[in-house]
Amino acid sequence: MSNHKGGSRFEILQRWKGERASTPWGNPVVYFLSLVLVGICVGPVLYIIFGGFRTNAQITQDPSGLPNPWVVSNYTSVLESGTFWQQLVNSLLVALLTTIGTVALGLMVSFVIARYRFRYAGLMYSLFAAGLMFPMTVAITPLYLLIKALGLVNSIFGLVLPEIAFALPTTIIILVPFLKSIPQELEEAAALDGCSRMGFFWRMIVPLSMPGVATTGILAFVNSWNNYMLPLFLINDPHRYTLPLGVQMFSSQYSVDTAKVLAFTSMSMIPALLCFTFFQKRIVGGLTGAIKG
Amino acid sequence: MRDPNAITKSRRERVEITLLSTPAIIIFLGFVIFPVFMAVYYGLFKWKGFGSPSSNGQFIGIDNFVLILKDPVFQKAVGHNFFIAVMSLIIQIPLAILFALLLNQKFKGRGLIRTLIFVPYVISEVIVGTGWSLMLQSKGAVNAVLAKLGLAGADWIANPKIAMWTLLFVISWKYVGFYVILMLAGLQSIPEELYEAAAVDGADFWQMQRSITLPLLAPTVRIAAFLSIIGSMQLFDLVYIIWGQYVSDTAGTSTMATYMVREGRLASNYGYGNAIAVIIFLISLLVALLYQKFVLSKDLEGGLTESK
């Protein structure tokens, strides 16, 4: 009897699935709402990008119009200026070093917390988790004094070290559940084959945790790329500006040249956008793991 | 035979634990925890940031803290922070749930739309601030679009009656995508079978959302709300970029952090600035603890027992 009922349920289910795929609200409504949403989210960004292709006269005359005619001089002058490239290199260096440092240190300590049985594992996890309560805003003033005392003002490492430190809590909170979910049997099998703990770390943990590592790495990269407060406090040499600081300085320096500011601004957002577009699925996937854990 | 083996193993383990965890712990303690404790110490001095506070500054006890708490400018900023925290929750969380439900539908082009919706979250506060401050000027693009639609514009940035709502709009625009990601991630962990069973029982779309999605999404919502509240308490970049250091006071959008940067760093009053940092920390901590005690406690218990 239950079998029979199951069969009919299955049919209903199939039918319902078929319906759901095409008409829960009706596809057109879903698409319409999605497009409105996308318009709101992307419109202002397009305004910045298109604005860079206009002249100031065009912008003054009709602030919300499209480029007519299109001019590339704003973009070419930004690309030809050393400033943009210098700041791009600075931002890239800081973001890459931060990402590498965060992932390496985070993976090592997460491995310890997740896979070693020792008295302080829970305490260690709580210590880093508590780090979420110490945001950069609170620490920035004393941090500036510390970096100054270390002689790292206007240095790339003065930015990288604090950024790694502040990226560690999120990284560890995402990676620990991830590493815990790797089956114990795998480790036992590796041990039987004569693989040491560290061998297991290198040969199994590092490759298996790549999805989690990608998530935390991208988050660290994007956060570092976008960080404004830290360079605002620690960098006063224009040659060491990262892009966010550069954009702000550029926009106050050329406040009358709106078109050029827009061109500079759109150039500076490209790398973070590319990074996110390529890895969007990874980020959503990684966060799913973190929340489940 | 077994005993020495076990000892070497555990000694070896201890070495491994130390080697693997020390670098992270040192960097974390050195650049996150230590500065916050130093802020408490610096906050007890009247000090311009040269040399050390004990020799170049003047010990004034808790005077800085009293002065800050009595300053009406700071009190207003605290009020703004709390207003922003509450309004951000009211605006962003329901929107994020709706958008996540929308983007959880299966339809062609969903991946592209998901990516595009996260664009505001990925670009930096500086770009968002610069872009919006240009668009929101009285002769900017927003007013021009409104004029084309036959609507009257406004002075979105400088008018103190509107400025706070402008700020809330920009904050929501910037961060709602992040909460959509969180909600989408939360939705993935709800078993598909529940919806299938509900469909068999004849539940419609909204009934399913109310009796399955919302209760099961509650832990995610609580975490999202927590992150949003903490973010509101620390708000700095957007206000500082759009309103600058002085206009934010007159426009009524100043926050504790903009107050800290202006009175501390820019005025070179490092004792005072550090005292403000401590107060911001204590206020955020208090809010977070209350939130954890009354809202988050269930989730954390679950999380800790699971992780054991």
Image (tube, coloured by chain):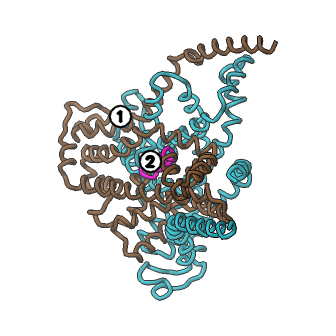
Using a 10 Å C-alpha cutoff, classify the residue at mark 1 as few (fewer than 14 neighbours), some (14 to 19) or many (20 or more). many
Residue range corresponding to the magenta coloring: A209-222
Mark 1: amino acid: Ala
For disc 2, the chain is A
How many numbered badges does the structure rendering display? 2
Q: Which residue is drawn at 46% across and 46% down?
A: A214
Element type at marker 2? helix
Relative to B60, A226 lies left or right: left
Shade representing chain B: cyan
Q: Is residue A121 above or below residue B271?
A: above
Mark 2: amino acid: Ile
Q: Nearer the viewer, mark 1 or mark 2?
A: 2
- Where residue B130 sits: x, y (%)? 36, 48
Q: Quadrant of residue A90?
A: bottom left
Relative to B239, A70 lies left or right: left
- Residues tagged by mark 1 and mark 2 found on one chain of the structure: no
Q: Is residue A37 above or below residue B24?
A: above
B303 is within the stretch colored magenta:
no
- Where residue A67 sits: x, y (%)? 25, 32
A219 is within the stretch colored magenta:
yes
Circle number at residue A218: 2
